Structure formats: C-alpha cells, structure tokens
Amino acid sequence: MEGDEPGTTRRSMLMRALLLAGGAVGLSAASADARPFVYKPGKATRVTFHGRNWELNAPDKLAGQLPARGERMTMYGELLDRAGGKKIGEFYGAHVSTLSPFGQTPFAAGALEMHTFNLVDGTIVGMGSHWDGAGTYAIVGGTGRYNGIRGSYAGTQRPLQLRGDGTAEFVLDLIA
C-alpha cells in the first residue's frame, strides 16, 4: 500500500496506535492519581503533609550535637499524604542557626529556614523561623501548578540527628 513501510499492515498500525493511546491514558491517570491534594486556583486550600526519614545534616556535627550560632545545615525527607501513607513528594531545606541572642521570648528564632516541597506537579517554596523544631513560615511562591501561590504554614520537624523519630508535619494554608 502507498505510504506503508515494508511489512507494515494497516492492522499492525492500528494496534500500535491503540497501544500508544492506551499508554497515554494510563500515564495521565497515574499522574492525576499522584497529585498530593486537590488545589483549585482562586480558592483557599488547607493541606497537611506528613514527613518520614527526616534528617538534618551538618558537615562538622555528630548526631545529637546542636548547631552553634551561624552554623548552616541541610534537611530532607519524604512527604506523605497522611501519617504512614503514600509518598507524594520530597522535602529539602536550608537551615541557619541563630539561637536568638535575646533569649527565649515570644519573638525568638532558633533558626532561619528555607523550604522546598517537591511535588509531582510543581514545587512550593517557603521561608521562616522556628524554635525547637516548631515554626511558622510564609509561602513565597511556587512552580508548575503552584505558580503564583501564596499563604503560610506551620511545621514541626523531628529529625533523627536531634534524637527525634524522623517525622515531620506541615499544615499549609494555600491562597491562589
């Protein structure tokens, strides 16, 4: 037949087309199912991420050793849809210890942090401070489906290196 490659029949071409279409539908369904939560631009959304395998690393520190003022550390962990649930992303953060020079007050910051929540359909970036593992953070932007996002969130981190159980929890209030 005109336009056909040698050995290619109309039936085999149709079968390939059907396989490709089926694969595309399967991939689309898989990526939609992997979305961590339903987020509709224009509506406020509250979502909770749970973390596991939470680690805090500094080049010159042993596990359990607290950082000194000015020291930098990195953090990372896996994000889950619920405690003990399905993995929906990964978390990465940068930590600079401040150890509030004014003592533990309602305004004190033990550290300044920048967070990146890597999700299947984009990232959410936040910044803020915390004291003793619990803090509040501003959502400063996002990519992909979260482009233009803003809001705030509270987080608690319990890294293994500081004698925690390796878990975390973040409650985000997202505004488009």
Image: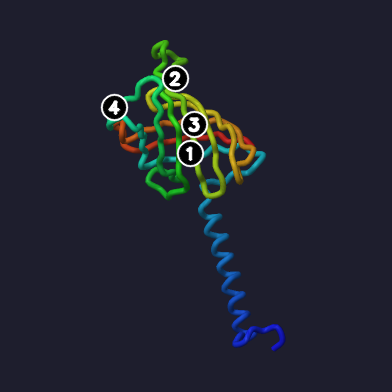
Amino acid type at image mark 2: Ala
| Structural distance between the alpha carbons of marks 3 and 2 | 14 Å
SS of the residue under disc 3: strand
Amino acid type at image mark 3: Met
| Structural distance between the alpha carbons of marks 3 and 1 | 18 Å
Compared with 168, 109 (above or below) is above
Amino acid type at image mark 1: Thr
The residue sitting at 54% across, 64% down in the picture is 26
| Structural distance between the alpha carbons of marks 4 and 3 | 21 Å
| Structural distance between the alpha carbons of marks 4 and 1 | 29 Å
- Work out whether mark 3 precedes mark 1 in sequence or the reverse, and give the earlier one: 1
Local crowd size for mark 4, using a 10 Å CA cut-off: few (<14), some (14–19), many (≥20): few
Q: Nearer the viewer, mark 3 or mark 2?
A: 3
Q: Which residue is mark 1?
A: 48
- Work out whether mark 4 precedes mark 1 in sequence or the reverse, and give the earlier one: 1
Q: Which residue is mark 4?
A: 65
Residue 39 in the image: state x and y as whole percent: 59, 44
Local crowd size for mark 1, using a 10 Å CA cut-off: few (<14), some (14–19), many (≥20): many
Q: Which mark is residue 109?
A: 2
Residue 47 in the image: state x and y as whole percent: 52, 39
Q: Which residue is mark 3?
A: 114
In this rendering, would 40 be left or right of 102? Answer: right
- Work out whether mark 2 precedes mark 1 in sequence or the reverse, and give the earlier one: 1
The residue sitting at 60% across, 75% down in the picture is 18
In which quadrant of the rendered image does the N terminus lie? bottom right
Amino acid type at image mark 4: Gln
| Structural distance between the alpha carbons of marks 4 and 2 | 18 Å
Compared with 152, 32 (above or below) is below
